[in-house]
Amino acid sequence: MNCKQFNNIPLEEVLASLGHLPTKQNEKEAWYLNPFAGESQASFKLDKRINLWFLHSEGIGGNNTDFIQKYFSYSVKEVLDWASAQNFSSFQQQTQLPAQSLFEKAKRLKPDYRIDEIKELQNDHLKKYLQERGLSENIYPYVKEVIFTVKGKQLYAIGFRNQSGGYELRNSFYKGSVLKKDISVIRFEAENKLSGVKSSHTDNIKPDVNPTTGNNVTDRKAAVFEGFIDALSFMELQKDFIGDLLILNSTSLVKKVIDQLKSYRKINLFLDNDHAGLKSKSEILKSFPSAIDCSKIYSGHKDLNDYLIYKTGIKANTAEIVAKFNSETFKRESLSQAEPSEVVQQRSGHFPTLPDEAPNHQKIQKENTRDENRDSLKQEDIQYYRRKR
């Protein structure tokens, strides 16, 4: 068996032989849990039309040979030896197009979406989605509302622009992108911090030339993120930051970010605490050993946004408890359920703030019982002494 023959075998059959079954599928595509690492949401996509796969969580993909090479860490020869030893039912009767034609067909495929409108954020459902992610209205100027149609169904999503004019899309039920995939860069100046005028998306950083080395270097700081939700979370947490935010939008674009980071002297990394994030961080640190890994700040959380949700959740719960305690409704309800003596105390403003300030009826009952038992023992001792005499 050669590579061409092996790549013509449906990858669906190869995956099934290894014990991997799709979590959902249709006639065009199938979704699997990551075959290379554990995960709870399917990120491995198989396009049945062209028999190619793409792992969204790591930004990699390819054909059957590429898959088995990564799966077993095999060389091409070892992949073909393994494939020859399998009993694939479709090997003898291959009906799919040759590999070269598959790539030509992929290029001819038209996108299955249409962008209908891009406007300022107005949709209340999208605003609620951002609120659930711990993001306030301060970040509205940095996103757009994108209305688009996929397979005849119109949808709306938060849109975040990249350097090539494409958009990353998010809502409560959808995660994707439209137009060309690329990184995003946001520049923060001293006069346009989050609390003031909005900063600008920039298509290219224009660094100064270092007169000593001749290299293009800027004294500006760079903060690197995997996704734009994490970048917006950073903006909520660090309102006084001055520098540039670089967003990968896909871990497959880490090399492009590395190339752009050559323009900075100080680099801070805020990447995800998962396999893909750790891999991207490792690649960046190889090129920039002095870069600062900031993931310890949100250790124990998947990413910076997860940490933000945790922090805002605590504040929200505390504020809710305080507000409820101070509300007139709470006071009325507590008065209606209180004993007469407690009502007098509450109306006069005297609340038992500590548990032991209020009468402990169980403790009193226990002490009374102990006293009764002691008196009873005394009587028994007297009776016993009299009998002895």
Image: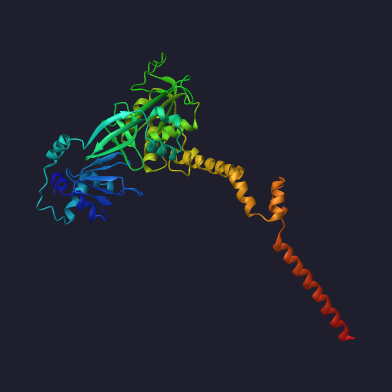
Against 250, is 345 above or below?
A: below
Image spot of residue 193 (x, y percent)? 47, 23
Image spot of residue 344 (x, y percent)? 72, 50
Q: Nearer the viewer, residue 64 or 362?
A: 362
> Residue at position x 37%, y 43% from top?
275
Q: How is the image coloured?
A: rainbow
Q: Nearer the viewer, residue 384 or 115?
A: 115
Image spot of residue 346 (x, y percent)? 69, 48
* Residue 186, quarter of picture: top left
The reply, left or right, for residue 245 in relation to residue 154 is right
Image spot of residue 39 (x, y percent)? 36, 49
* Residue 207, quarter of picture: top left
Q: Nearer the viewer, residue 171 or 75?
A: 171
Residue sticking out furthest to the right: 389
> Residue at position x 17%, y 42% from top?
50
The answer to whether residue 72 of the structure is visible from this angle is no
The reply, left or right, for residue 31 in relation to residue 211 is left
Residue sticking out furthest to the top: 211
